[in-house]
Image (tube, grey):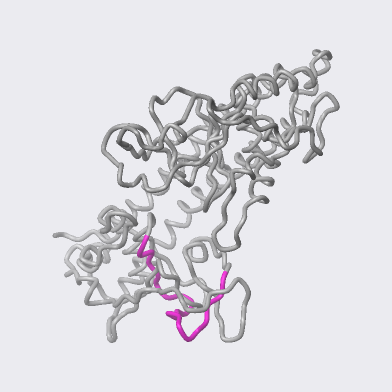
Amino acid sequence: MTVVAQSMAKSNSIPLKTLFTSHKGKKPEVLTDTQIKDSVPYIDIKAFEKDEFRRFADKKTSQLVTEGELLIVWDGARSGLIGRTPINGALGSTLAVLRPRKNMDIISDYALYFLRGQFHKINSNTRGTGIPHVDPEVLWKLELPQISPSEQQEVVNKLNEVLPRVRTARERAQRARDNLRRFLQSILQSAFRGELTEGWRKDNENQSADIFLEEMLRLRESEWPKGKKYKNPKEVICTPFGDIPSQWESVKSDALFSFVTSGSRGWAKYYSEEGALFIRIGNLSHETIHLDFKKNQHVSPPSGIEGSRTQIELNDLLISITADVGMVSHVSENMGEAYVNQHVAIARPVSVLNSKYLAYYFLSPEGQKQLVGLQKGAIKAGLRLDDIKDISVPLPSLEEQKEIVKRVELYFEIADGVDKRLQNIIEDCELTTSSVLLSAFKTNE
């Protein structure tokens, strides 16, 4: 056992409340996208975590912080995350700065490492029923081992030696995951330019989109919602969004859907522990067309309310239309009774169309560019239902749609296996970091 470890084992511990004060960030009166006179960078969660500075705040009404101060995420899913102020600026409303009290012999990095080791405890003991917040009772009762400044520095030096290696391994795994996502985007781009099935078309020369399109338009009318007056698509053939093979057509998405709607407002009062699934934005993703059921909400709506309109059916496309717009999921299996909230649109493809083909196109770079480009509102971005009907879609024959989906899903399946292994490496690195930090500050209690 080292001298420092012996000192740590015999040390007294000091409640964090006696060492630091906290000062919560706030939303300033003036917040702009461009720098103006007497303004400073606004340090929100993205600036804190990723050094992405997007806005500027007036100095007069802001909580100002200086580069290098200890910051903690106070509100949201990452509550308890600790770090340093990246630059001088205005502190965002979801963050707080921790400032040492006077005459406290605590090295800043020593406190930083201690708090990083306590992230799980703080994050899993938050308060608040909706958005989680740091619980001050939990934070201030944490006890920091009291050792001399020289011993604190020795702890810091040892952690500075060990943790960068773990961080490097984690960063390599994360870069590999990022490269994997870019690879899948390139596969989708290749698929919807016809490059992925170029050889297939040479072996299937009689396949074209003309006859298929005629059949689909006939079916669209027969599948129109009962009781609703049929509306012809405003436009069928359109200018391609990118290069496509000569056998394909470029078609407006309005011609491909028999029904497009969004969820109703005010369903929070129907939330329950069981009942019908209630799909929200958190169930959708920009990276896959598969729904994420890790966090589910259920509803028990009373009979007779306006609900059948927003009920999900097999092969529907679900698209986020507010906030993080353009996330797309495909209903690949029968989920029983299920609905969407007001932030999610249901787009029901004509039954003859391969609905997965359409979902993957909306997920592709070309599809995403169109969806994001159509969003309205500078402050509160969103898509209208008419926007979802205004996407230019490259349309091959039905057989080629099936072939494209088969090949795309093969790549996604392989990538999913690799991604899971990389995620395991990242989780192992995080566990190692946590274990090292907790061991470094272990005392005999």
Residue 161 in view of the camera: yes
Q: Would residue 170 be counted in the magenta stretch?
A: no
Q: Would residue 71 be counted in the magenta stretch?
A: yes
The answer to which of 354 and 310 lies nearer the viewer is 310
The answer to which of 432 and 341 lies nearer the viewer is 341
Q: Residue at x 29, y 86 (%)?
A: 102
Image position of 444 (left or right of 315) = left
Q: Quadrant of residue 98?
A: bottom left
Q: Tell me the magenta residue range.
A: 55-75
Image quarter where the C terminus lies is: bottom left
Q: Residue at x 51, y 32 (%)?
A: 290
Q: Residue at x 28, y 58 (%)?
A: 122
Q: Position of residue 270 (x, y in %)?
A: 30, 42
Task: Specify the farthest residue to the left.
Answer: 445
Image position of 348 (left or right of 205) = left
Q: Residue at x 52, y 66 (%)?
A: 47
Q: Position of residue 227 (x, y in %)?
A: 53, 28
Q: Quadrant of residue 361?
A: top right
